[in-house]
Image (cartoon, rainbow, N blue to C red):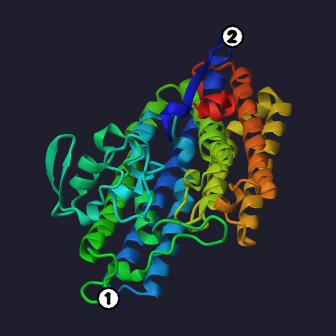
Amino acid sequence: MRPAHLAACALAFTLPALTPAKAEIDRSAIVANYADIAAAGYADSLTGAKALSAAVDAFLAAPSEDTLAAARTAWRAARTPYMQTEVFRFGNPIVDDWEGRVNAWPLDEGLIDYVAPGYFGAEENTVAELNVVATPKFTLSGQQVDASRITPALLSDVLQEADGNEANVATGYHAIEFLLWGQDLTSDKPVAGQRPYTDYLQGDGCTHGNCDRRAAYLKTATDLLVSDLSWMTAQWTQDGPARTRLMADPDAGIAAILTGMGSLSYGELAGQRVKLGLMLHDPEEEHDCFSDNTPESHHDDVLGVQNVYLGRYTRTDGSVVSGPSLSALVAAADPDLDAALKGQLTASLAATQALRDASARGMHYDMMLQVGNDAGGKLIMALVDTLVAQSRSIERVSTALHLSGVNVAGDDSLNAPGEVFK
């Protein structure tokens, strides 16, 4: 997410007289179930990250086509539960302040490793082509940096957002994605990044040089992902600070839920991740641009919003976490609004499924973004339209429930398209 494109609009309403006892009981139970779903989602994400780490270890121990394919499969699997947790952003400062460590995007991959000739990175990014893998010593912000050992501190404290530039992403899913796939240099055919396994061979057969440092970077990045997800999982335990903050004020907790649902639906997903890329026709704006996994991630984002609204999450082991739902609370206040929002969530999921189906048939997301691909453009805009519709209903929910403090993040691509090209 790049905040330069975001603008928040606070929805403020006067609170009429309620029946405090009943409202407090119902809303407390809903918030508690929301926290249970968050705890389960982050626990599943941690399990996926550990499986990814094991697959990376196996790949680095014996690089081959098969072990690289297994690591890529583990990365995709690890994304599924994590993307369903993105709905916990925006309304929960603990999550939003942390999120950049694991899912910051887009990134200037030339910071990390070799890139194709002609790659320039983001404007005014002085280290867009640093290539830390090949550069054991360098100057950053006027300071000499010894990167002879690739350590967690180097990645998270020195390189992440180096020089204050958000395009300098050194950690998280997308850094790992780039190290597993490499750049995706083909946007007119259904081909993802084609990094060879030989980029990790030690000794004879190593391609592009520095295979030992590249392996160290990949190992360190996956270890950091496990560590970061371990920390976030702990925030949602029974006494964890994220849960405690929500439970302190059930009305504020419901407002936080709606802020997360609305901001992910509108500014972040409909705007930053979907419409902006289509406006620019730029494959670099594809969320999972190295692996061409974007339709899956979009689907899981929308599924996460539905999970929270319906109060039900299916874990990766098939078990289900469920309880009192926001949907039931809305239905009691405005049955038509509840039905409309549920229908819009279903429509958004159908729109992401259409993207998945098109990708499976050979039209990858970067191909959909190309100028002149009218069919792809229609598929993408269909998702934008359904996301905008559901975000409007989410805003209406705050009125129906007499809530203040709901802040839905917007985006220039939706609110002021002309600003995008300035």
Please give the residue where the numbered disc 1 appears in the rendered image. Answer: 205
Q: Image check: 100 left or right of 304? A: left
Count numbered badges in the picture.
Answer: 2
Residue 370 occupies which quadrant of the picture?
Answer: bottom right
| Residue drawn 65% across the image and 24% down it | 23
In this rendering, which labeled residue sits more in front, label 1 or label 2?
A: 1
Between 404 and 283, the one lying in front of the other is 283
Please give the residue where the numbered disc 2 appears in the rendered image. Answer: 16
Is residue 179 visible in this depiction of the protein? yes
The vertical placement of 372 against 25, above or below, is below
Q: Amino acid at mark 2?
A: Pro
Packing grade of label 2 (10 A; few <14, some 14-19, many >=20) is few
Can you name the residue that lies furthest to the front here? 118
The picture places residue 246, in percent across and down from the top left corner, at 49, 32
Question: Dot 2 lies on which element?
Answer: loop
Residues at marks 1 and 2 touching, judged by CB atoms closer than 8 Å: no
> What is the spatial separation of the Cα atoms under label 1 and label 2, in whole angstroms?
72 Å
The picture places residue 385, in percent across and down from the top left corner, at 78, 41
Between 353 and 164, the one lying in front of the other is 164
| Residue drawn 66% across the image and 27% down it | 416
The picture places residue 128, in percent across and down from the top left corner, at 36, 51
| Residue drawn 52% across the image and 35% down it | 90
Q: Amino acid at mark 1?
A: Gly
